Amino acid sequence: MKKLPRVSIVGATGLVGRSLLDLLAQRKFPLSELTLFASSRSARKTMDFLDDELEVEELTAEAFREKTDLALCSAGRKVSYMLRDWIEGTDIVVVDNSSAFRMNDEVPLVIPEVNPEALVGHRGYIANPNCSTIQLVMALKPILDNFGLRRVVMSTYQSVSGAGQAGIDELSAQTVALFNQESWEPKIFPYQIAFNAIPQIGPFGPDGYSEEELKATNETRKILGLPDLGISCTAVRIPTFACHGESVMVETEKETSPEELRAVLAAFPGVKVVDGPEDNLYPVPSMTVDLNDVFVGRIRRDLSAPNSFHLWIVADNVLKGAALNAVQIAEALL
Amino acid sequence: MKKLPRVSIVGATGLVGRSLLDLLAQRKFPLSELTLFASSRSARKTMDFLDDELEVEELTAEAFREKTDLALCSAGRKVSYMLRDWIEGTDIVVVDNSSAFRMNDEVPLVIPEVNPEALVGHRGYIANPNCSTIQLVMALKPILDNFGLRRVVMSTYQSVSGAGQAGIDELSAQTVALFNQESWEPKIFPYQIAFNAIPQIGPFGPDGYSEEELKATNETRKILGLPDLGISCTAVRIPTFACHGESVMVETEKETSPEELRAVLAAFPGVKVVDGPEDNLYPVPSMTVDLNDVFVGRIRRDLSAPNSFHLWIVADNVLKGAALNAVQIAEALL
């Protein structure tokens, strides 16, 4: 039997890092030692883990390589590029929440319920998909397997927690300032986010799509192994603190019905169907905070074309959209 | 030359009623007398109009018929049913903001820039379309005329002002309560609206569509004279106070390009194109409050199918989406 791994969390003090720490404790993740890394600014802070108080260490190549068998990383793209160099020639495995290597052909991009087979033969570096991609693909997979997928058109309703703690702080401070008629300057978001809707998440590319929209498109194709899937996205930031909503139009290859879609979605691990229009039942972000599942409702026929259906998908973007999926990947690796 | 009409506003103290009053003053609407009607609860309140102070009167059949040549009505469906009976056999003309008669074949449903010809031969009752319909159709019309329309799929981001002053008050009070960790009960919206997104506007029908979604679908078909247009909608309430956003996928009959779409949209009266992704320029609700135009941005090719494009449409739902369009109809009638 193999020794239990020494686990490191890189970016431990961030929003996703703190969630990773909670999940390792909650899920009794098998580990022999846990090290928390962050930037020098956060070093020497302490964080609780089970009955211990752990001191955050400054991330250096030496310390990282010395103390890590398996790293869960959520510290931005620059750190990810460093880590990938640092693990060269070692047996260290990194599960990375950043977008740095997601579209790299040598790096598996994994949702454990959807494409665990992609982990086979990995080269030490595994990418965790983007939050809005994960909850979309969790709903698309059972539809693909049962009825085929011809086209996907998505509009998102994304919470500020997708921009980390700073995003949460900005919505909170701006809301208070607006109520007190005080002035404020947008820092994290390009415009006022309190009581507003911003159809931009990340910089725009030459074809007019934002980075977030292209992530949803490209990552979905890679995870589902459908490089030519017709998929298009409009990503919008709205003033919710937690959980992303997604309004999705799906065109299937085979004929099906809302009833059949509900059945295959409900049977898929990690997906919960909440769909009772007669009782005003559907998922809303305020209901799915801190929950692990991906929730789907409003399942109905599209009125504009045959074999087309609408779904409304909500999930906690910090959990299944980030930290939980990363921990599930780590569990699948063991 | 005809005498100037005696104008009545029915529902004068509501959110749209107040906006109607402002617009009549701002636009120097030609009238000989103005009467403000409301329920008995609001009677005897006073409201400013130009240099006058007008007293609100209780709505009765007698007073209404005695003082009205042209009525602008925004007082809910029940009042609309009454008014339609009251004007039977008179020459009174009603422009009605409620949904009561919008889909009635004998009632024109009019956006003056789009289908002014529908006013010809009206029988005294004219319907103002739904807010989310008006801003959508303002953008669809120039596309239809130049390139044809094959399919429309829309997801909305609708402000609480669509539910009137009570909706605004509920978002405001709930936001304050949540920040103060006080309890609150949803009254106007089915769930918490502060920091949330609710994919339900109005009751659901048997096919799983909400009333708002079916309004957008059916009214768009009627206004454009395209009874078989493929159009489908997901309507979502978000915590913005004013202005609706719409993420729209449009499939055209003929080949076109984002450049051509920008040109035909910019040339259409009442539409402004704000679309400069390289400078992070696109409309957001906070920028379009109290503005008359319908703003369109994020115009780009859909990545999932040919001849398909995305638009992001924002307009003030109380102005072009309600009061302004009603006043424009009245202006067209004179």
Image (spheres, coloured by chain):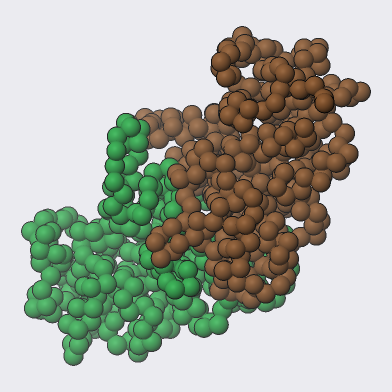
Chain colours: A brown, B green
Name, please, the residue furthest toward the front: A1
A41 or B46: nearer the viewer: A41
Question: Could you tell me residue B264's position as x and y percent?
Answer: 60, 67
Q: Quadrant of residue A96?
A: top right
B83 or B278: nearer the viewer: B83
Identify the residue at horizontal 39%, vertical 48% (top origin). Answer: B193
Left or right of residue A271: residue A88: right
Q: Name the quadrant of the C terminus of chain A.
A: top right
Left or right of residue A146: residue A52: left
Identify the residue at horizontal 44%, vertical 73% (top origin). Answer: B206
Q: From what the image shows, is residue B198 above or below residue A230?
A: above
Residue A206 visible: no
B25 or A79: nearer the viewer: A79
Question: Could you tell me residue A110's position as x and y percent?
Answer: 75, 43
Left or right of residue B171: residue A92: right
Identify the residue at horizontal 20%, vertical 62% (top origin). Answer: B12
B7 or A312: nearer the viewer: A312
Question: Could you tell me residue B157's position as x and y percent?
Answer: 48, 55
Residue B123 visible: yes
Q: From what the image shows, is residue A181 above or below residue A231?
A: above
Left or right of residue A91: residue A161: left
Identify the residue at horizontal 82%, vertical 26% (top origin). Answer: A1
Name, please, the residue furthest toward the right: A89
Question: Could you tell me residue A183's position as x and y percent?
Answer: 40, 30
Q: How many marks?
A: 0
